[in-house]
Image (cartoon, rainbow, N blue to C red):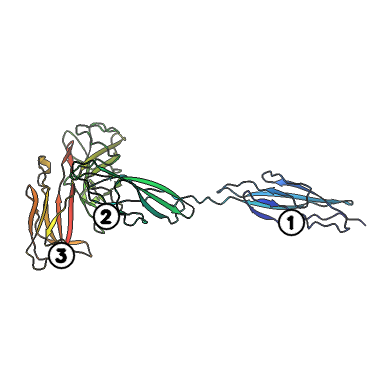
Amino acid sequence: MSSAPTADAGPDQAVASGAVVALDGSVSADPTGLALSFKWTQTLGPAVSLSSATAIKPGFTAPAVLSGQQPAALTFSLVVSNANGASAPSTVNVTVSPARPVNPAPVANAGADQAVASGATVTLDGSGSVDPNGGPVTFAWSQTAGAPVTLSGADTARPTFPSPVVAAGSPAATLTFSVLVANAHGSAIANVTITVNPQGANFPAPPGTPPPADPNQVIQPLGGNGSHRFELGSQQGLYLQDPTPGEPSVRGFVVVTLGSPASGSGFLPPADTVVTMNGVPLLRDPALNGSFFRLDPAGPQPRIGTGGQMVLVATGTDPQSGKQIQRSLVLPCPNDITVSSTPGIGSSLAGATSVTITSPSDITFNLGVGIAAGNFPQATLFGYQRAAVNIVASGSPHNIAPGPLSITVPVTPTAGDAYLLDLRWPGTFILDGQTGGFCGLAKRWTYAK
């Protein structure tokens, strides 16, 4: 008695996107030993082209399935025949997995171009470089143009170097640097330009600095109905300082009010008011009636180079018109100076009755604007607790006389474990409408007790 053969299309398979796949009907059998013929047919999934629909082991190329797509399911049917008839069909499933994500090269970022003082210590900043997949990256900095300098930490994100000395009256020096950022899958290059200004030169505004607001404008470009005026100022001034851990790099408050230009009265700014300092959002301080904004010591700190600009921008929604209103104020910051101290900075004040600080620079401030009266350059010797970053007692502030810096500050007993000398001077007051402000500079250093 004759019988039909049995088809076997082989086990199910899981393959990669674009892989070469071989179907296998070799386990199909004919109990009578007669020769078999094969017939393969695709019954499901994206159409593919079989190398031979009548072969025992035909092949095909799996369809491309992109990363992020669902796997593709393909089904094939096999019927085998001999002289006695055809078998029942046997099926096999082939699952095509999506392609693996491409591991990209990193994105290199050498930081913003800088304008720096002659002889200043400069920090390059590649910390904005990233691996798109969050993996580690390596850094390799090199100088590509300009007077040669020595980089410290050329294999780190933030190398430093001393800028060359550029004599007064000479053209500014231009230095360029390149950073090669690499990960396991590739590399990328970014460049940055450092302009070294000659001694005594003023620094240009950083790129993108908006112009000062019109002091006579009442209705803002983005809205307002004329009965309210959006005001932005710094009241007693903002002071740049070298931050101690746990302290902000800028001290002072930014004040925002929404009031009547006719009466000069000020009211709370809108609830959605946002204030930025060189692009860094400030904290609103409810303890000071909600009109005051300050820098978060635990958050990002604004980048302000010596002799640069302080750019304040306030935005909010006018509660009367529902339109967005905006105010900007650009405050020039004074240049840094070199100070000498007797006894020397960092030394012990044990047995000393006073500290004398001197500099050939004149840091006095022209108090020609009445609203700024009282903001004299001052030096104060505080008692200080280093670990707590806390001033525990202080002597009175000492106003600094006009001319080159020279002042003697008495040493008074303190419960602190050190002394901190605070030298600060305001910059030029900028009057903007009925308010305004200034950006000052504070130099601080400690002495042992």
Between residue 199 and residue 357, name the one nearer to us: 199
Q: Give residue 381's position: percent from left, percent from top.
A: 12, 59
In the image: residue 128, left or right of residue 83: left
- Residue bearing mark 1: 10
Q: Amino acid at mark 3?
A: Ser
How many residues crowd around disc 1 within 10 Å: few (fewer than 14), some, or many (20 or more)? Answer: some
Instruction: From the image, tell me which residue sits under label 3.
Output: 347
Q: Amino acid at mark 2?
A: Pro
On-image quarter of the C terminus: bottom left
Residue 184 image position (x, y, % from top left):
48, 55
Which disc number belongs to residue 311? none
Task: Nearest to the eye among marks 3 and 2: give it.
Answer: 3
Relative to 74, residue 342 above or below: below
Left or right side of 44 for 333:
left
Name the N-terminal-most of marks 2 and 1: 1
* Residue 311 spot, x, y in % from top left: 25, 42
Asked whether the beta carbons under mark 1 and mark 3 sit within 8 Å of each other, the answer is no
Q: Residue at x 12, y 65 (%)?
A: 349
Vertical placement of residue 202 versus 183, above or below = above
Please tell me whether mark 1 or mark 3 is closer to you in this view.
Answer: 3
Task: Judge by depth and name the residue closer to the eye, 274 or 187.
Answer: 187
Residue lying at 17% horizontally and 67% vertically, measured from the top left: 417
Upstream in sequence: badge 3 or badge 2: 2
How far apart are the two marked residues, 2 and 1, measured between alpha carbons?
Answer: 68 Å
Identify the mark nearer the N-term, 1 or 3: 1
Residue beneath disc 2? 297
Does any portion of residue 272 appear in the rendered image? Answer: yes
